Image: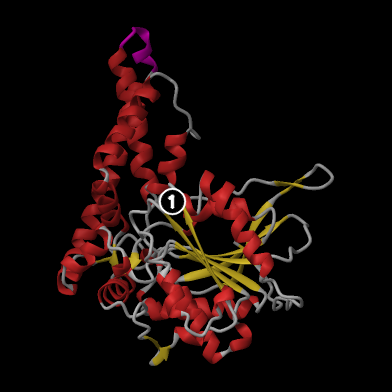
Amino acid sequence: MKYMMTYDMMESMRNTNQWMGATARAFASYPLMAMTANPAMDWLRAWGEVTERTFERMVVKPDWNIPALPNTDGTDMVVTTEVVMKRPFGDLIRFRVGNRPDRTRRVLLVAPMSGHYATLVRKTVVSLLPDCDVFVTDWHNARDIPVSAGKFDIEDSTLYLVDFMRELGSDIHVIAVCQPAPLTLAAVAYLAEEDPSAQPRSMTLIGGPIDPDANPTDVTDFGHSVSMGQLEELMIQRVGFKYKGVGRRVYPGLLQLTSFISMNSELHGKAFRDQIIATAKGEASDHDKHNEFYDEYLAVMDMPAEFYLSTVERVFKNRDIARNDFTVAGRKVDIGKITTVAVKIVEGEKDDISAPGQCLAALDLLTGLPDDKKFAHLEPGAGHYGIFAGGKWRKNIRPLVLEFIDANAGSAPSKPKSNPAKVA
């Protein structure tokens, strides 16, 4: 029961703030208040509207909302999601574009499990869909997973990726964004030794901490400054009684969000003040830049405690993957066994989360891969988010990634395994 009360207290505080915002908005919008001009009511309504939306979105998984794509005949092709493989801690989903024939480029986009939902890579999906068949790892919120489903650590996550790649066939091209880059590298190395025919054609690693010590940041410094006992004591709680995962040990999303915001508290504070002013003036809208960004940024998910703790201990502290000493299910994974999968590294010059050099370290580990299958790109002026979404991704990085995929497509792609897809 330890920390269950703390978990429920955080949820109660969130719920109370949402209620206060809704109450203020409703009170200030009461028709009687419009009888006389009262600017205070406009400000109260604006504060209530922004506050209610802010705290409400913290517990809601954002929709993918992928826009329709134009067909050759001028009609729109609706984009839907299908579950290709369903697992307790995450599904493999596919974005199907109307009745469009399958694309020759088949991409598995490995989304981060780092506090936000897989919808964090929504803009990446939107940019790839016109040219590719896109599959995504859709991780589940740990608070909704019953304790009976068991544990989920970085070894389990690696084996999930192995199973997803096997399901999709060897003509797949893998793109891993940020946090899962080390585990994706390990999964391909696992396949290289255990099931070579299931290896992907290419692997693109974007801004991931393959070797966190190659160029330390505040994130890596924090990992070294605290002990595992301190992390477990301070960060880990048990899911409260409101959710299906009651009793499961997690790193709560609300606690993660507090850390995210504290890193740039002044910037976020100014953004919300400006939004309240814009709302009071009638200049805000449901889909303005503020709401588009914070609808995603504030939507957080609980992370399984064993996944968070094993990531800190084995990826950041012990550097198991950087030292090529990572084990999965008792078997040592040798990254040097990768000999045929082309690898491209993408980093951002101004990335302050996974700094330049951390992801590039993967190429030194690929001792069995010929140099003509190793590639790297450093995007000038790009921060962490900019290397997989935004203008720099669309204009500069995406074309390079598609060119890389085409160059390593092979001549005889295998067909995907048949699997009755379910509509998500």
Is most of the magenta stretch helix, strand or loop? helix
Q: In this view, does 132 lie above or below 414?
A: above
Can the viewer see residue 169 in this picture?
yes
Q: Mark 1 points at which residue?
A: 385
Residue at image point 35% right, 37% down: 52
Label 1, residues with CA under 10 Å away: few <14, some 14-19, many ≥20: some
Q: Position of residue 10 (x, y in %)?
A: 23, 53
Residue 124 left/right relative to 335: right
* Residue nearest the observer in this picture, 60 or 207: 207
Residue 74 in which image quadrant? top right
Residue 353 picture quarter:
bottom left
Does 36 appear in magenta?
yes
Q: Residue furthest top?
A: 36
What secondary structure is found at the residue carrying circle 1? helix
Question: Is residue 328 a member of the stretch shown in magenta?
Answer: no
For the N terminus, the image quarter is bottom left
Q: Which of 189 and 100 is in front in this view?
A: 189
In the rendered structure, the answer to whether residue 85 lies left or right of residue 263 reads right
> On the picture, is 337 further left or further right than 316?
right
**Residue 178 location (% of width, % of height):** 43, 62
Which amino acid, mark 1? Tyr
Image position of 374 with respect to 134: above or below: below
Tell me what residue is drawn at x 38 percent, y 64 percent.
357
| Position in image of residue 67 (x %, y %) | 64, 45
**Magenta region, residue range:** 31-38
- Where residue 136 appears, x then y in whole percent? 56, 64
Q: Quadrant of the C terminus?
A: bottom right
User: Quick one: which residue is furthest to the front in this view?
Assistant: 371
